[in-house]
Every structure is written in C-alpha cells, then in structure tokens.
Amino acid sequence: MTTSHPLRAAPLSSAAALRRRGLVFAMALVPVLAGPVLADEEPVFRIEFKDGVVTPRRLDVPARRRFSLELHNLGETPAEFESRELRKEKVLAPGTSSVLVIRTLEPGEYDFFDDFHPDAPSAVLVAKE
Amino acid sequence: MLGSQLGNVVFVIWRESVEALLIIGILNAWLRHNDVGGRGRLFLWSGVGAGLLVAVAFGTVVVLFSEAIPESGQQAYQAIAVLIAAALIIQMVVWMRRHGRTLKRELETALGQASADANWWGVFTLAAIAVAREGAETVVFLFGTLAAIKASSFLAPLIAVLTGFLLALATYAALQLGSRIVTWRVFFGVTEAMLLLLAASLLMTGVDTLADLGILPATRRVWDISAILSDSGAVGGLVGSLTGYRARPDAVQITTYLLYWGIVCWLLRKTRSARP
C-alpha cells in the first residue's frame, strides 16, 4: 500500500519545526510527486477515486493539526467520499475535484470509503502525533 | 460496466431513496387509513414535488459547478435541514398518536381544520426535506452514471438504474400493502418505531455536522464496536443512516442519543392514552 505525503515546499520558519519533522519523515519514505504547492501553512493530502478504487488506501496525517484533503475523481463513474468518523461526505461527479478541511483529529484510525461504490474495499486515515 | 458496478448502481439508487420513501410511505399510509379527505395527502405529495425540484436544482449545480457553494455554507444548510426534519418527525409521531382516532370528527370543526392544516404544513416540509436531501445526491449519481454509458453497452447500466428505482417503488408499495395486511395497531407500532429511528439518525447527522462546523465540541471516542458492525461500507452505512448507529461514538454523540430517546419516551408516555 502506498502512503501519500504533504504536497508543499519545505518550510523555512522555525515555527514550523514540528511540521518539518513530519515532512522529512514522509519524504524519506516516498519519492516526491509533482503537484500543487500551497503558500499557506496547512498540509494538503491527495485522495483519488477511480471507479471504486481509492488511492491511497492508507493515509498518514498529522494529529491535532489542521489539514486539507484534496479529493479527485479520476474515474468515469461518480464517487462519494464518505466517513462517519470524520463526519464528512462529499459527492464527486466524474472528472471533478474538491477540497475538504479537517480542523483537528485525535490520534487514531478513521475509516473512509466511496459510498457510490460500497462494495469496494474501504480506506483508512491514520492520525499520528 | 462491470457486474459489480451494476450491482452498485442498483443498491445506491435504492439506498438513496429508501429514507425518503419510508417517511413518505408511512405518512401516506397513515393519511389514507384515517381517510381525511385527501387534504393531508395533497400537502404530502406537494412536498415531494417541491423536494424533487430542489434536488434537481441542487444536483445540477453540483454537477456543473462543483465548487460553487462553499463547504461550510452547505454544511450549515444541511445541519438546519436535518434538525428541522428530525423535530418534524417527532412532532408528527406525537400528533398522529393524539389525533388518530378522532381526526375525522375534529375536521368537522373549524378549529380542528386549522390545527390539522398546521400539521399538514409540517407534512409538506418534512416530505420536501426528506426528498431534497437524498435526491440531490441521487441526481449527481444519475448524471454521472448515465454520462459514463458507452454507446456499445448502454442497456445494462440503464436497466440497473431502472431496477434501482423499481426496488425503491417496491419498498414503498410494500409499506402500503403492509398497512392493509397487518392490523393497524401493529402497522402503526412498527412504523412509528421506524420513524423515530429515522429521526434519531437525522439528529445524529445534525449533531455531527455541528461538531464538524465547530459549533459543538468534537470529543474523543468512548468505545469502538466496529468489529461487531462497522459504520462504513454497504451494510453498516445503511444501518447508520436508518437508525443513527455509530460504531465509534464520542461523548457528544452518546449523550445526544440517550437524551433523544429519553425525551421521546417521555413524550410518548404523555400521549399514550390517545394511541389508536
């Protein structure tokens, strides 16, 4: 299973030391993918839906931090990001994208799945300090 | 499309319709049973029509301009709508208990008619919210599913869509049939419980949305019974949306659920004597 990583430039200010630790850790594990770079301080994670296949199926995110989820429906059929535990649902017509903001998560695992492909395997968001 | 995707299409269309169908079907059966001259049913089905218009409008906006409405605005509307719907269901259950046997007589008085009219507006609003809520998602799902049809294999997905709607109609028909087959007392008892569970689910959705907006606190999980029944996926998700079940509830959710049933039981006990 692949793990996604925050897409942004390396932080420069000392106030971002915690974030840098997480970023370095993540970047040590996976190759850097080209992607949008945000000017503000929130990490952004990418989740792709393609006709029932959710990528990645396991996503590591920071706990107790604000972050964004970029949802992309790359398939031909509609998808719906649904997570009871994150209290979020978002319908994605084919070929569209959307952004969800998560304000804060206690450490733990949070299931999510594509509610328009309910028989497909679900995925999990893992929040770690 | 793959076979499993066709199964998904049937299931999703049925599932999106079932919550609204239960509410409308139960209300329609009750109104028909009490033979109140069709006025209540006029309000009910006008509400359904209004809900469909809203669903198509909103669904179209989502398909064409997916980011037109900011997320927190959508969530605020959703929270308000589901909380109103939950309150209306409770009010309606209490009202149906109280007025069941005496409604025909009451409608012969002006006061009785006015009081009934107030309730019919509640029926209209509830039907509209119930249909609009799931209808918007269904519209987006339909658009996307039909757009994905390729010329060479259009028949199978089309049949899947129609089958989903037919199953939904069958569920509605089963409700109407049920009201005729079993005794009214049994039917009313069972459907009353179904309505109250639906209201609980709507309340939980409202509380969850408020917690996500930061209006209510989001607290830690208290227990985790997802090994028994997860609230993700097809079965668990359906149970969750029909009853308000949560596999990993936090303190706010547990408190809400307990308070809800406490209040509902108290309300029902107060109207026990008028039960049909």
Image (spheres, coloured by chain):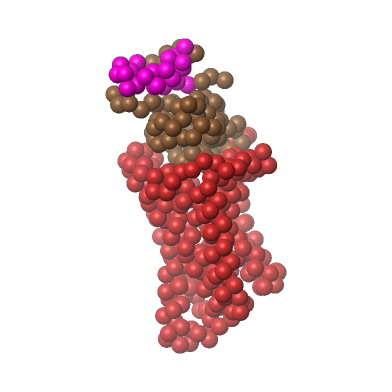
Chain colours: A brown, B red
Horizontal side, residue B180 vs residue A108: left or right:
right
Between A5 and B67, the one lying in front of the other is: A5
From where the camera sits, is residue B159 visible?
Answer: no
In the image, residue B173 sits, relative to residue B36, either above or below, namely: above
Q: How far across and how far down the image is residue B129, in percent?
A: 44, 58
Does B163 lie within the magenta span?
no
Horizontal side, residue B183 vs residue A111: left or right:
right
Q: How far across and how far down the image is residue B57, in percent?
A: 37, 50
Between A60 and B188, the one lying in front of the other is: A60
Q: How many marks?
A: 0
Q: Quadrant of the N terminus of chain A?
A: top right
Residue depicted at 45% across the width and 27% down the height: A62
Residue depicted at 48% across the width and 87% down the height: B108
From where the camera sits, is residue B204 visible?
Answer: yes
Q: How far across and how far down the image is residue B199, in percent?
A: 53, 59
Residue depicted at 52% across the width and 41% down the height: B220
Q: Main secondary structure of the magenta part?
A: helix
Does A26 lie within the magenta span?
yes
Quarter of the image holding residue A97? Answer: top left
- Which range of residues does the magenta coloring cover? A4-28
Residue depicted at 63% across the width and 34% down the height: B3
Q: How far across and how far down the image is residue B165, in percent?
A: 56, 51
Between B158 and B17, the one lying in front of the other is: B17
